[in-house]
Amino acid sequence: MNATAPARPAEDRDRAGAGRRRTRVTLTAGLLGLGVLLLAATALSLAVGSGDVPLRDVVQGVVDPDRSVRAQLVVQEVRVPRTLAGLLAGVALGLAGTVMQGVTRNPLADPGLLGINAGAAVTVVFAMSVLSLTEPEQYIWFGFLGACLAAALVYGVAGIGREGATPVKLALAGAAVSALLISVSDAMLLTDSHTYDQFRFWQVGALDGRGLDVLLQALPFVLVGSLLALGLGPRLNGLALGDDIARALGQRVAAARLTGGVSVVLLCGAATAVAGPIGFVGLAVPHAVRMITGPDHRWVLPYSALAAPALLLLADVLGRVVARPGEVQVGVVTAAVGCVPFILLVRSRGKAAL
Amino acid sequence: MNPAVTDAAARVGRLQRARRARFAAVSAALGLVALGALLLSLTVGDIDVPLADVWAVLTGGGDPASRFVVHELRLPRALLALVVGACFGMSGAVFQSLLRNPLASPDVIGVSAGASAAAVLSSMAFGLSGLALSGGALAGALLAGTLIYLLAWRGGVSGGRFVLIGIGVGTGLISLRSYLMTRAEVTEAHNAFLWLTGSLNGRSWSQLWPLLGCAVLLVPLTLAASRGLAALQLGDEAAGGLGVRVERGRLALLACATGLVGVATAAAGPVGFVALVSAPIARRLLPGQGAALLPSALTGAALVGAADFAAQHALPATQLPVGVVTSVVGAPYLLWLLARANRVGRGG
């Protein structure tokens, strides 16, 4: 302490206020930049494909398709639904991953590890194998149902006991339920190689072959789930401090966790219905985003909601062009393309923001 | 001496004795389960061999028929199950406590993904099978472990960075594996899938000996390396302050644990979730006793032993791969432990 001490707090406050304003400006600019990137990815996804379509036909095909022109028909029937599927699944996965990591306070939480993908897989295998459903439109809603049931089971098991659903119990319960369900679906698949033949294509995750009607059915789930998730920012910030401090700050911890759980189920269920079990996006995007925004969930959530669909669409476009005339499924490309920048990003920071 | 101090010392002594007694009791119980699974799988089967005959065979006697059944068919497989389980259980315990995250098992952080990607690649692209395939899987696990460590190295390896890099590497490898699987013929893909669930069907002495040799080498090494583990669990700064050579200790532990996963995967395929569930089960049976490496190994052995017996006999006329059953046996038990525990430590 020195003689100028009394003047310091005010000065500090001013400087902190200026810093915060500057951060807010930078972060808003970043958010806008991501929005532009997402728009570009959307445009690319509409314009690039296995067949060449002139740009004029692309625009026409989106705005006012002339169904007698084959190129415009392709755009309307194939690329528009596919792009929408990417947008829906991407937003859902990005937000769900962020909320899961916040609620469980575990940086490894994602739909693949917390039992949700395994739940979807079991019901999809059941639909394929026992009910002999062959069309994606028929069995994807089984995926939704399975995701919901698995999440309810995980939450139920973790919630028993005096402390309720603590992060460690949630993580372990999720892993255990995952293990159990995967072995059930494995047992069904091992005894039925015909179903396995279908399943291996569903399992990697893909955006093509989803009709507009399916997407329209999934839309309300994604909308409600996204609104719930985006509103969770301040409460996730509280939870990040630990249950006791959050409680002392006047938060209802259990209610916040339950809201998070509901939004995760809606989002993951819809994403699985639209695109199959796509891993990695929900896990990696929040980490990448946190390295830009810092730990404040009020920024992490919207950033993830924009970055995840951009990643998914760009990966899908890449998957269409790398193996012409064939295609590589989006789940494979996302993981293969995403892991390199993810590793570089993790390396570039001295300490990962865990 | 101050009576309060002697009183406290006596209480600490009592607690320590109680703790040691519990450790011994739990270890003995787990060992008994494993032994029971071993004896069951030696006696029960298409031809039932009475326990007395099994004993005769094991001591070098017995009639030729039961000698063939027990010594050539059942013993190597049953022993393999126990050793594989112990390797997975111990390596899971090391990874989870070293990286301070209950989800950070080798299945999750990319080491097993390295083994399985290498195995699928070597069977589909190079047509390998048998011991060559096992060698490929072991090489894959070691390569993936080395790659993760090198990529996570930045003047030292922090636990958080290791986990995240591991997930990144693992994801890339899994996508390679899935891509190969969608490109393969359906029968080929189905065979690879069978290997990927982890199976002990048709294992013989020729698979057991290399595994046993590696395990006899690696398990004591891991235990020796784990002496600094309790300090490392406090965080790098605290461990350094306590005089532990953080980086060296961590490298030794990671190398041992990766080796354990590698040899176990090479022998039986990536048997599902043994590495993930063993340590949490052991730690819930022995609360407050640190990493519990040995009990975790015993849990793993008991789990795989029991699961392999169930896999052989649960369904008539079908031999399920053991990897399907381990989670059916282990996961509900862990869930039950979780649901029952009403106080739980934070962190891992």
Image (tube, rainbow, N blue to C red):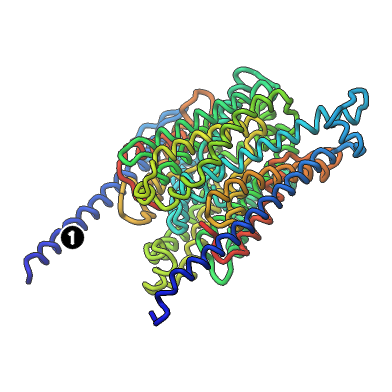
Screen quadrant of the N terminus of chain A: bottom left
Quadrant of res A93? top right
Residue at 39%, 82% (x, y): give it: A3
> Where does the image place residue B247, in percent across and percent down from the top left?
49, 70
Please state which of residues B110 and A152 is positioned toward the viewer in this rendering: A152
Please state which of residues B71 and A263 is positioned toward the viewer in this rendering: A263
Q: From the image, tell me which residue sits under label 1.
A: B12
Identify the residue at the far top of this view: A131
B305 vs B48: above or below: below
A124 vs A281: above or below: above
Identify the residue at the far bottom of this view: A3
The reply to whether residue A215 is in sight is yes
Q: Chain of mark 1?
A: B
Q: Secondary structure at mark 1?
A: helix
Q: Residues within 10 Å of mark 1 (few under 14, many from 20)?
A: few
> Where does the image place residue A336, in percent across and percent down from the top left?
70, 49
Instruction: Judge from the rendering whether residue B54 lies leftward or rightward of residue B264; answer left or right.
Output: left
A145 vs B62: above or below: above
> Where does the image place residue A293, in percent across and percent down from the top left?
59, 56
Instruction: Judge from the rendering whether residue A110 lies leftward or rightward of residue A172; answer left or right.
Output: right
The reply to whether residue B206 is in sight is no
Instruction: Judge from the rendering whether residue A68 lies leftward or rightward of residue B278; answer left or right.
Output: right
Residue at 69%, 23% (x, y): give it: A137
Please state which of residues B246 and B118 is positioned toward the viewer in this rendering: B246
Please state which of residues A350 and B253 is positioned toward the viewer in this rendering: A350
Q: As shown in the figure, which amino acid type bears the numbered disc 1? A: Val
**Numbered disc total:** 1
> Where does the image place residue A114, in percent across and percent down from the top left?
51, 40
